[in-house]
Image (cartoon, rainbow, N blue to C red):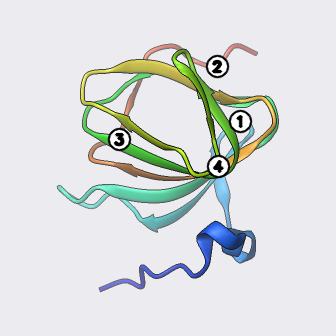
Amino acid sequence: MPETTRENLTKDGWKALEFGPFRKGVTIHWITPFAGDQPGVALLKYEAGAGVPRHRHEGLETIVVLQGVQSDEAGDYGAGSLVVNAMGTEHSVWSDTGCVVLIQWDRPVRILEEDRA
């Protein structure tokens, strides 16, 4: 079984982790990548002004904001916020100031609208 422990995430422990490309302005650290029917668990780090375009949730998505503020059409979510997006819901996500979130997806999302350059 792969190592899945990450220490002190709520106390900036994520800063010592390696992040790789995900989307423009957003990097990812996989804790548990998608595998068969297993959900994906990761940390996403948004640069100020970065976002993910409109997408549909093909499964449940659960987010905990660790630092900064993540926003969507319904509001702004600061550090400590829990955001749950049900299967079938759609939105876009961004961070004006930058943020780090812990995210679990039951299934990958479907991008509905590509980034505007």
For label 1, the crowd category at 10 Å Cα-Cα, with few meaning under 14, some 14 to 19 and many 20 or more, is: few
Tell me, yes or no, whether the two marked residues, 1 and 2, touch with CB atoms within 8 Å: yes
Residue on which the image places disc 2: 115
- Circle nearer the N terminus (3, 2): 3
Q: Residue at 28% across / 31% down in the picture?
A: 86
What type is the residue that disc 4 sits on?
Ala
- Circle nearer the N terminus (1, 4): 1
Q: CA distance from mark 4 to mark 2?
A: 26 Å
What type is the residue that disc 1 sits on?
Lys
Query: If the image is split into quadrants, where does the C terminus sit?
Result: top right
Residue nearest the viewer, comparing 57 with 36: 57
Q: CA distance from mark 3 to mark 4?
A: 17 Å
Q: Position of residue 90 (x, y in %)?
A: 39, 18
Q: CA distance from mark 1 to mark 4?
A: 22 Å
For label 3, the crowd category at 10 Å Cα-Cα, with few meaning under 14, some 14 to 19 and many 20 or more, is: many
Q: Is residue 74 left or right of residue 26?
A: left
Give the quadrant of residue 39: bottom left
User: SS of the residue at dot 2?
Assistant: loop
**Badge number at residue 61:** 3
Tell me, yes or no, whether the two marked residues, 3 and 2, touch with CB atoms within 8 Å: no
- Circle nearer the N terminus (3, 4): 3
**Badge number at residue 69:** none
Q: Residue at 61% across / 78% down in the picture?
A: 8
For label 2, the crowd category at 10 Å Cα-Cα, with few meaning under 14, some 14 to 19 and many 20 or more, is: few
Q: CA distance from mark 1 to mark 3?
A: 21 Å
Give the quadrant of residue 10: bottom right
Q: CA distance from mark 1 to mark 2?
A: 8 Å
In this rendering, the answer to whether 11 lies above or below 21 is below
Q: Position of residue 115 (x, y in %)?
A: 64, 19
Q: Residue at 57% across / 82% down in the picture?
A: 7
Can I make out residue 52 in this image? no
Q: Which tag is nearer the camera, tag 1 or tag 3? A: 3
